[in-house]
Amino acid sequence: MPVITISRGTFSGGTLLAEGLCRRLGYRNIDRDAIVERAATSGISQEQLREALEAPPGLVNRSRHKRYVYLALIQAALAEDVQAGNAVYHGLAGHLLLRGVPGILRLRVIAPLEYRIRMASETLRLERADAIKHIEEMDQHRRKWTRYLYHADWEDPTLYDFVINLEQVSVEAACEIAAAMVEKNTVNFSPESEAALASLAVAARVRANLALDPATANLEVHVEARGGVVTIEGNAAGQRDAVLRVARAVPGVTEAVLREPGQMDEAWPWSSRSR
């Protein structure tokens, strides 16, 4: 039950590749809007969540804690949605939101500027100059967001398992190549992968629920999970009872532990971080 994430620039063919892979493999097609819609069921509006993803980092800095809350909800929604496997996610930073989970095929799609200009012009009905401006602005925005949220270079090839350049390879051919990688188990989605996704989903949901509960909403914590055992790290000694109450109420949690900063077991990789 593999999971595929696709990173792409604006109008670089990523959506077409995702749609083709879903048809070819019978997988679910999950985009950013689907995750925003799922996350919004937690009581935060879709408009607020989209603003957290779309507003320039400088503006979000003015309400840093809101950004923390919204991203906790988005990570929880994504982890829960792909937990069943057989899914392709093409949205903002999927490969980073699911970082640390083994067996996820992380694709990056790039395309020549002329291809992107043509796609933007046809889709948005823009003149050439306006299409170029739109592409440059969106790329710069995504580059800044990735650096701001994850301290990573969006274009760093080491973040991906396979980079596809559509300059000479068609979307159809790219789809066949990526599908063959899945069918030949190039990236092994093992029982460990399933367990890691389940643990990440639990950790992310604990962090999201802590961000929403009035008794713990002021906290920003690091949560890690292994199976049903959840470890929470943060300056929350004065709210210990409330933190443990909220964490233990999350489905799948069998034990919750609160630790001071710096005491987390670094061997536990499946975490939801407050970056």
Image (cartoon, rainbow, N blue to C red):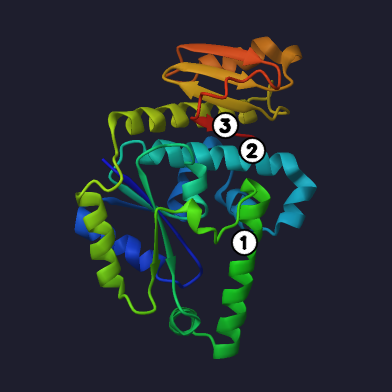
- CB contact under 8 Å: marks 3 and 1: no
Front position in the image: 204 or 217? 204
Q: Pointer 2: residues within 10 angstroms few (<14), some, or many (20+)? A: many
Residue situated furthest right in the rendering: 62
Q: Return the residue nearer the eye: 170 or 52.
A: 170
Give the side of residue 28 with respect to residue 47, left or right: left
The answer for how far apart the CA atoms under marks 3 and 1 are is: 25 Å
Q: Which sits earlier in the primary sequence, circle 3 or circle 2?
A: 2
Of pointers 3 and 1, the one earlier in the residue sequence = 1
Question: For mark 1, what is the residue?
Answer: 143
Residue type of the residue flagged with mark 2: Val
Q: Quote the CA–CA distance across marks 3 and 2.
A: 7 Å
Amino acid under label 1?
A: Arg
Residue at point 55%, 38% (across, down): 73
Packing grade of label 3 (10 A; few <14, some 14-19, many >=20) is: many
* Mark 2: secondary structure: helix
Task: Tell me the quarter of the picture where residue 110 sits.
Answer: bottom left
Of labels 1 and 2, the one closer to you: 1
Identity of the residue drawn at 35% across and 40% down? 103
Q: Amino acid at mark 3?
A: Ala
Question: Label 3, on which residue?
Answer: 208
Would you say the residues marked 3 and 2 are in contact, meaning their CB atoms lie under 8 Å apart? yes
Q: Dot 3 lies on which element?
A: helix
